[in-house]
Amino acid sequence: MTTAQTTELDVQPTPLALLLLGREADPRSERGVECPGDLPSPSDPDLVARARAAKEKLGDKVFVLGHHYQRDEVIQFADVTGDSFKLARDAAARPEAEYIVFCGVHFMAESADILTSDDQKVVLPDLAAGCSMADMATAEQVAECWDVLTEAGIAEQVVPVSYMNSSADIKAFTGRHGGTICTSSNAQRALEWAFEQGEPSATKVLFLPDQHLGRNTAVRDMGMSLDDCVLYNPHKPNGGLTAEQLRDAKMILWRGHCSVHGRFSLDSVADVRERIPGVNVLVHPECKHEVVAAADYVGSTEYIIKALEAAPAGSKWAIGTELNLVRRLANRFAPEGKEIVFLDRTVCFCSTMNRIDLPHLVWTLESLAEGNLVNRIEVDKETEAFAKLALERMLALP
Ligand code: 13P
Ligand code: SF4
């Protein structure tokens, strides 16, 4: 693994053009299809009252989950908020709720469907809320990769570890091949577990789809070297790697990334340190390796929130994660005298997380309150069985 490979991120094409808000479909994407409803107008002054009334009418029948990157207008209606790991655990916490409304993105709703009972229905308020990172690993590409590893004679030594930010198909592949899911809160434990598997033990991990989380965890947290990692490019024959490179590697990283966290750069870090002397730089592990290496602290969204809760009054923080969360934290902690800024000068929302807005939430809740099940996310039984195996391995990690 060379530094030159990490900068390939800059030239990797975005595989999908952005879809108009809830109005179009891309069948190659994990993000689903067109929103079928008549959405209320965003300028309707009664949206908050309408959401509240529909939620009250549904009572215990509905459980609303909200990821930290959701808009304030949506998060105010969440029964629980959290990072991907917390929400995966919380999804199953209300077995009496008939409807789980997931304010997050498609792969999170799929995971909730896998982890909840068959009679609970998981609903995503806008079916176009996908994740560009999850779209970077398709089932066909990953099956082809496994063939490449088999050809190189190493498949038996490889344990797949897939980031939560992947489609149910990829999670099922992972379960089928003895691997586990991880999130940004438990990636190190998942990798340690993976390297203990096999006979006598696994010598390699196929980490997908986020190259940065895989590299950062292996190198920063577990003491591996950059040379222990190779980058598998699904758009090149044999992943762009020789059999020898695959045999020598400990970490085979899938060439995927988050388009939001991928925007932070060494320049953003240098710039904020110059602008705000004494600032603490705190970034999400989906950021590039050089950004993580230059930061003071690194962790998942839940970690970021806890770090700021524990921070002393008067401290200064530059945060490298999605803007909805950073803005919310800046407002929350300003009265305590904690100065919190966004790491980059340019605005950087996750456009797909942002697709879930108040009109979509109102439409969803009102439809459910009228007995119309809309935007259901349902994973087929076979995929569910193997994906659940991989998710349960994650939930059982020490
Ligand atoms: P976490 O929720 O695990 O921090 O991940 C961030 C993210 O990008 C979710 O899509
Ligand atoms: Fe996907 Fe990145 Fe958005 Fe998370 S922040 S949903 S990883 S594009």
Image (cartoon, rainbow, N blue to C red):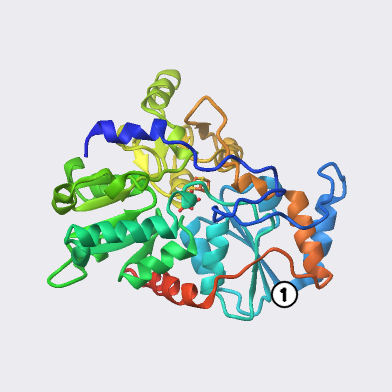
Residue 52 spot, x, y in % from top left: 80, 59
Residue toward you, 368 or 305: 368
Position above or below: 83 against 391: above
Which image quarter: residue 351?
Answer: top right
Q: Quadrant of the N terminus?
A: top left
Q: Residue at x 54, y 53 (%)?
A: 28
Label 1 beta carbon less than 8 Å to ligand 1: no
Quarter-of-image position of residue 257: top left
Above or below: residue 178 compared with residue 141: below
Residue on which the image places disc 1? 61
Name the foreground residue: 376 vs 368.
376
Say which element carries label 1.
Answer: helix
67 to the left or right of 52: left
- Which image quadrant is residue 171 in? bottom left
Q: Nearer the viewer, residue 248 or 319?
A: 248
Can you see residue 315?
no
Residue 9 image offset from top left, x and y in percent: 38, 35
Residue reaching furthest to the top: 274
Q: At 53% across and 62% down in the image, what residue appears?
A: 87
Does residue 131 lie above or below 271 as drawn?
below
Q: Residue at x 62, y 49 (%)?
A: 70
Image quarter where the C terminus lies is bottom left
Q: Residue at x 51, y 33 (%)?
A: 340
Image location of residue 21, percent across then percent down:
70, 45
The kind of residue tagged 1 is Lys
